[in-house]
Amino acid sequence: MNQQHTPSEAMKALINLELDQMQRIHQSFVMDQGLHHQILTSAGLIAEALRTKNKILCCGNGGSMSDAMHLAEELSGKFRNNRPALGALALSDPGFLTCAANDFGYESVFERGVEALGRPGDVLVGISTSGRSANVLRACRKAKDLGMMVIGLGAGDGGDLASACDICLCVPTEGYADRAQELHIRIIHLWLALLEKELFGI
């Protein structure tokens, strides 16, 4: 016989606490006109690269790797509307990552990928909620050395990521990576909507 599980008051309170925090941080994001301007500016940089047949490389660790992959697949695949494929790749191949980490150290994996694939005029999107991910920072610096534009997705004051990028979009947070990641995916979806409108009028 199945017994119905009754949530405890503590579990109900946790849901309310999480949703209240999420709403508070999201409202701060919605009201931040400076961040809105950065979203438009960075979307314009990505659009210009794609318009001139350059590509977008993306990298991050853990949940930020998932966000990097999400951005790349929706550029090369589709977001909301059918349109031509756009050149984008997340530096996420397990064979490459484990090879580069084994031979050069984990801090070098994304730098190595940028060195292999990056060209002047390309864009690197580096994602780090802490702003201190050594492998993302090294990739950003390598990309700038190669003449690429570098866009960061960070949180709070951006940490070291802020100075390693041409533009760094730092979302509000209250100390938790998941809160920042929720807004990073919101920015990614805004980018995609703006790019489809800018490049294809859809």
Image: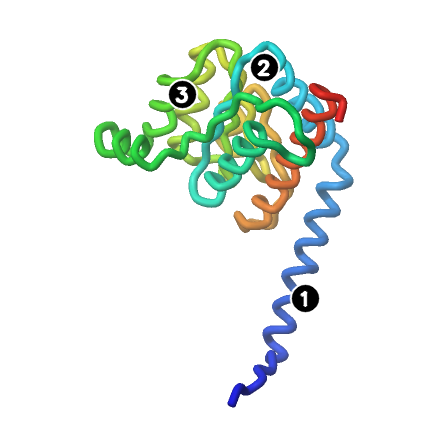
| Tag in front: 2 or 1 | 2
Q: What amino acid does circle 1 point to?
A: Asn
Point out residue 93 in the picture as x, y percentages from the top left corner: 37, 34
Distance Cα–Cα, label 3 vs label 1: 43 Å
Q: Secondary structure at mark 3?
A: helix
Distance Cα–Cα, label 2 vs label 3: 16 Å
Q: Which residue is mark 2?
A: 49
Distance Cα–Cα, label 2 vs label 1: 43 Å
Q: Residue at x 39, y 32 (%)?
A: 134
User: Given the current orientation, which residue lies at the most extreme bottom position?
Assistant: 1
Q: Residue at x 60, y 80 (%)?
A: 8
Lower position in the chain sequence, tag 3 or tag 1: 1
Q: Secondary structure at mark 2?
A: helix
Quadrant of the rendering where the C terminus is positioned: top right
Mark 1 neighbour class, 10 Å CA radius: few under 14, some 14 to 19, many 20 or more: few
Q: What amino acid does circle 2 point to?
A: Ala
Lower position in the chain sequence, tag 2 or tag 3: 2
Q: What amino acid does circle 3 point to?
A: Val
